[in-house]
Image (cartoon, rainbow, N blue to C red):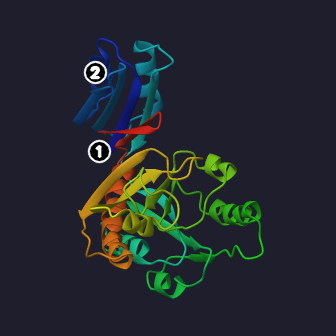
């Protein structure tokens, strides 16, 4: 038996759950778990975990579903329930990267880390301990576009399903983002939408906030404004300096990024407009 995930979204209509369950049944599939949600605007989302025999054909299932639900605004996708292939991008900070590598080493990350890419060589000795390829692609002396072309050459060797920005402190151009649309996950060291851009902990300190946080989101062409996947906070007070906030915030960043990746890699996240639906 193999495990698969059926993702469906589109205009709400009567009988959608029935159509899916009957088609899976007729294709000798066994449903393990199913979640649905209908938005206030009438948009339907469903995620179905199911088992199938070795002769299972995803294209046949989607074709059968399309005959029952001919509305072209309704989308179907079947993904095998297996680890995602990813590449991690980083700069100089190690805390998110080290957390992901440690989880990967102990089998706690539902992904295959194909490589780590950075515009600095600072973290290469650490990454080498995990026998993961490390690519140093310097940005010095290059335009942003030229640097990204070098990045794309490296990424092209791996063809990752997702890119994870583990404190990759460079703004990506629209052309780069378009090549990995809805497949770049970033961790931002602030509780968005507050304090976007650089030095959010300094901004938070100067504003006298009582909570700090972190936000994991998909990357789009608006700085730190992509669809939010996961967030968390930590209470602070007037005794915290900007340095204290930064130190405490790093722990929040690690847990939020891990939570977001767990959701994304299990195909639990739908992007709807500039929001996410998580089932």
Along the line of sight, the residue nearer the viewer: 245 or 17 = 245
User: Position of 138 compared to 243: left or right?
Assistant: right
> Residue 105: where, in percent of width, then height?
35, 75
Q: Are marks 2 and 1 in contact (CB under 8 Å)?
A: no
- SS class of the residue under badge 2? helix
* 278 to 82, vertically: above or below: above
| Residue at (60, 47) in percent of width and height | 221
User: As displayed, is residue 244 above or below residue 88?
Assistant: below
Residue at 32%, 30% (x, y): give it: 46
Q: Which quadrant does the N terminus fall into?
A: top left
Label 1 Cα crowd, 10 Å radius (few <14 / some 14-19 / many 20+): few
Residue at the (57%, 47%) spot, across then down: 222
Using the image, tell me which numbered label, if any, was put on residue 57. Answer: none
User: In the current view of this chain or complex, which residue is farthest to the bottom?
Assistant: 125
> Helix or strand or loop: what does disc 1 sit on?
loop
Q: Which one is nearer the viewer's eye here, 71 or 24? A: 71
- Tell me residue 254's x, y (percent): 34, 67
Left or right position of 234 against 80: left
**In the drawing, what numbered circle is on residue 17?**
2
* Residue 227 higher or lower than 232, as above or below: above
Identify the residue at image location x=52%, y=78%. 92
Residue that label 1 marks:
1
Of residues 8 and 217, which is closer to you in this image? Answer: 217
**Gap in angstroms between the C-alphas marked 2 and 1:** 23 Å
Foreground residue among 55 and 129:
129
Sequence order check: which comes first, mark 2 or mark 1? 1
Q: Is residue 216 left or right of residue 21?
A: right
Quick check: can you spot residue 109? no
Question: How many badges with numbers are in the image?
Answer: 2
């Amino acid at each position: 038996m193999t495990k698969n995930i059926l993702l469906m979204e589109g205009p709400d209509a009567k009988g959608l759950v029935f159509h899916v369950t009957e088609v899976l049944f007729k294709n000798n599939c066994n449903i393990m778990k199913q979640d649905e949600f209908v938005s206030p605007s009438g948009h339907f989302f469903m995620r179905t975990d199911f088992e199938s025999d070795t002769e299972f054909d995803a294209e046949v299932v989607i074709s059968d579903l399309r005959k029952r639900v001919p509305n072209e605004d309704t989308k179907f996708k079947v993904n095998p329930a297996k680890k995602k292939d990813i590449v991690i991008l980083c700069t100089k900070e190690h805390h998110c990267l080290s957390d992901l590598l440690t989880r990967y080493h102990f089998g706690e990350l539902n992904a295959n880390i194909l490589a780590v890419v950075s515009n600095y060589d600072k973290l290469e000795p650490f990454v080498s301990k995990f026998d993961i390829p490390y690519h140093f692609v310097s940005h010095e002396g290059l335009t942003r576009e030229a640097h990204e072309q070098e990045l794309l050459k490296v990424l092209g060797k791996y063809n990752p399903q997702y890119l994870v920005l583990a404190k990759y402190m460079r703004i990506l151009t629209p052309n780069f983002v378009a090549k990995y649309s809805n497949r770049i996950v970033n961790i931002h060291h602030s509780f968005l939408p507050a304090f976007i851009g650089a030095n959010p902990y300094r901004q938070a300190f100067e504003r006298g906030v009582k909570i700090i946080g972190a936000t994991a989101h998909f990357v789009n062409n608006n700085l730190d404004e992509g669809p939010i996947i996961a967030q968390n906070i930590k209470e602070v007070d007037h005794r915290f300096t900007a340095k204290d906030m930064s130190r405490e915030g790093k722990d929040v960043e690690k847990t939020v990024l891990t939570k977001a990746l767990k959701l994304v890699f299990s195909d639990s996240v739908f992007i709807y407009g500039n929001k996410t639906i998580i089932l």
